[in-house]
Image: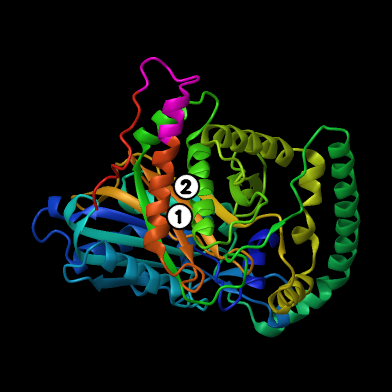
Amino acid sequence: MQQLDPFDAAYIHLETPTTPPQVLAVYVFDSGAAAAGSLTRESVTDRFVARIARIPALRHRVCTVPLSLDHPYWVDDTSFDAARHLHFHDSQGGDWAALRRRLIEIAESPMDLSRPPWEIHVVTGLRDVDGAAEATAVVIRLHHVFGDGLASVEIARTLFTDEVQDASFGAAHADVGSQAPNGTDLVWRALRQAPRRLVEAGRGVRDTVAASREAGDRARQGAITLPQPTRPRTRFNHRPTRARTFDAARFTVAEVKVARAMVPGTTVNDVLLTTVSAALGRYLEEKGELPPESLAALVPMSTRGILERGSVNQYDPLIVDLYTTEPDLRRRLELISASIREDKQRDLDDAVQRSRGLVRVLPAPGVAVLSVVSRYWPESGDRVSLSNTMVTNVMRGPADMRLGDAPVVSSYGLPSPDDHTALCHGIYSIGDSLSLCFVSDPQMLPDPERYSALLRQSFDELVRALGESGEGSGEDAVVPTPGSPAPR
């Protein structure tokens, strides 16, 4: 058996019934382009079972230690049957609205952690989705303990292409073996290791506090810029229920790149963060709830190839100012782009990295206690810590994925809210298709169609503002036509 990295284990310790940490990746295929009868339930099952066998980590389940005395372990599921993880749903001619409802049902359903923490859902019989008259959607659902968004991409490319993936989660599962642990043995093992863990925790807390002071000193010297510690509370900064709402705005990568090229030095992510900033501000303004102070977003940044870590979740959180009080959209884009650059510089600072080590040094019982305290700590005041929403970006590569003969046409995702952030956005691209998705609690976002429309409208307004300012745009730049998303 292999013990989980403390960062990954935190997803088990900190999970609550209303905020299960999960990754939901959605791929839509044009099943009308496949040969007749080639996408039967039996053929799809056989294909997936054969491809799943290429990823040994998918056989592993989480074994928790009684009373959370230590971090959980990965163990081999001796009764593993890949077919038990596959679920088929016939939408009977349903459209995008039917797919949305199905995705919400999947996101709301509990995951069985007595088995390997992943599922694949195949939604058949869809009509008129993203330009495909006949469509099939495949949903890859992972518990976050298994991996992050890029881990889900590695699984997808194993399932839907002929690539042989060197999955980043392989090392974390390398020494699992077939030995099934006994609960009593795990308790004794935890108790024997407790003195060493406490000594390490004491040193770790001391070093974390010292690193935090050092980071503060560096900020005062102007070497780095620390994020604003609190932001105004909004309707989306309360504990969500288990219920979910979901929708998306559709774009092409090409039109976003054209907008990016109009402001040299910015990125596709900068453009879409500005779109989120404008849409979120407009939505709150329509509700009469827009704070006079700027909001901020937590933006996960992948650390693969940058920092060496043993966890399967490899990212750091950036805190990006959304400048919701800046009326000039071009200026807002420039400010958000600068905020991201500052955050990336801060994130790689040695003192900042060491100041984030608390979750890696706290013993498992300490993390479990923090989870309970956080869950029941009463919400109060009009301020929240650091950020108001989350925006993640997962690029899924070229559009070379196929389900049998059916080519992929688009992709989506459902990011997971937490106890303090009930509105989460996800940017997902494959080929030239790009979706800007969002998930929230229906009590906080009762009109997702309106918010989806605001995302598209905000992008169009940004494009117009960039075209009108004209500064820095190349002579050959072609302004994308506003209001022309790809068809569903």
Disc number placed over residue 163 in the picture, else none: none
Q: Residue furthest bottom?
A: 184
Q: Amino acid at mark 2?
A: Val
Q: How is the image coloured?
A: rainbow
Tell me: residue 212, above or below residue 328. Answer: below
The answer to whether marks 2 and 1 mark residues whose Cβ atoms lie closer than 8 Å is yes
Kind of element beneath mark 1: helix
Nearer the observer, 397 or 338: 338
Stretch of the chain drawn in magenta:
463-477
Residue 164 in view in this figure: no
Q: Is residue 277 magenta?
A: no
Q: Is residue 475 magenta?
A: yes
Q: Number of labelled discs?
A: 2
Q: Nearer the viewer, mark 2 or mark 1?
A: 2
> Of the residues under marks 2 and 1, which one precedes in the sequence?
1
Q: Position of residue 25 (x, y in %)?
A: 41, 57
Q: Quadrant of residue 95?
A: bottom left
Q: Quadrant of residue 481?
A: top left
Label 2 vs label 1: CA separation? Answer: 10 Å
Q: Is residue 209 left or right of residue 170?
A: right
Q: Residue furthest left?
A: 36
| Residue at the spot 87% in from the left edge and 59% down from the top edge | 205
Disc number placed over residue 394 in the picture, else none: 2
Q: Position of residue 296 (x, y in %)?
A: 63, 50
The residue at which mark 1 appears reads as 152
Q: Is residue 14 left or right of residue 169?
A: right
Nearer the observer, 214 or 275: 275
